[in-house]
Amino acid sequence: MTANANRTGKILILATESCAYPGANSVGQAHASYPANTYILRVRAPVLFPEQFYLDCFKKGISGILVMSCGEECPYEGAYHALAKRLDRVYQMMKTADIDIRRLRLTAICTVCNRAFLKEVNDMNALVQELGPPTFKSAA
């Protein structure tokens, strides 16, 4: 196995069912490709996931997480702002755990945002290859 292969990490995408997931689907319909280490989870609203979920993902082998939401166009009133606040708390938890906060990114993706979707995935893939897998402080 090459050194570069050791650094390829898994990328989890939380894609909202009303915006980002159809956007990901349109990428497939356009026959565009993105890295095979990407796993897309279709979710009603990413705000449903508690803060600890993200840290648990990193501990279980996920190297980067993209939260692809509808942004201000979210069909659930207040959900986007609640999500942004929740992720701010997650960033603080990541800093405490010495996890690079660039491993978690919130972005708005619409139903036809092919280029934006591909850019986000490719940027995250480049980052996780650069950083390698997340490491955790051992408990004292």
Image (cartoon, helix red, strand yellow):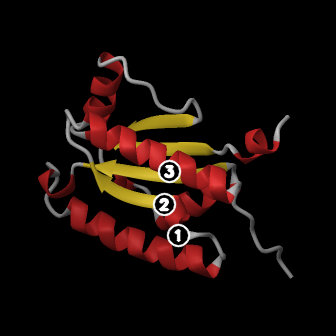
Does residue 47 appear in this view?
no
Q: Which residue is mark 2?
A: 104
Q: Which residue is mark 1?
A: 101
- For the residue carrying disc 1, how many other residues have a C-alpha within 10 Å: few (<14), some (14-19), or many (20+)? some
Residue 56, numbered label: none
Q: On screen, 113 above or below 49? A: above
In primary-sequence order, the first of circles 3 and 2 is: 2
> Is label 2 in a helix, a strand or a loop?
strand
**The residue under label 3 is which amino acid type?**
Met
Q: Position of residue 64 (x, y in %)?
A: 55, 53
Does residue 1 appear in this view?
yes
- Tell me what residue is drawn at x 52 percent, y 69 percent: 101
**The residue under label 2 is which amino acid type?**
Leu
Callout 2–callout 1 Cβ contact below 8 Å = yes
Query: Spatial distance from mark 1 to mark 3, Cα to Cα?
Result: 12 Å
Q: Position of residue 130 (x, y in %)?
A: 64, 56
Q: Quadrant of residue 138?
A: bottom right
- For the residue carrying disc 3, how many other residues have a C-alpha within 10 Å: few (<14), some (14-19), or many (20+)? many
Q: Position of residue 95 (x, y in %)?
A: 58, 79
> Is label 3 in a helix, a strand or a loop?
helix
- Tell me what residue is drawn at x 66 percent, y 76 percent: 98
- For the residue carrying disc 2, how many other residues have a C-alpha within 10 Å: few (<14), some (14-19), or many (20+)? many
**The residue under label 1 is which amino acid type?**
Ile
Q: On screen, 112 above or below 106? A: above
Q: Which residue is mark 3?
A: 124
- Tell me what residue is drawn at x 50 percent, y 50 percent: 124
Given this view, does label 1 or label 3 mark the residue nearer the observer? 3
- Tell me what residue is drawn at x 74 percent, y 64 percent: 135
Viewport quadrant of the N terminus:
top right
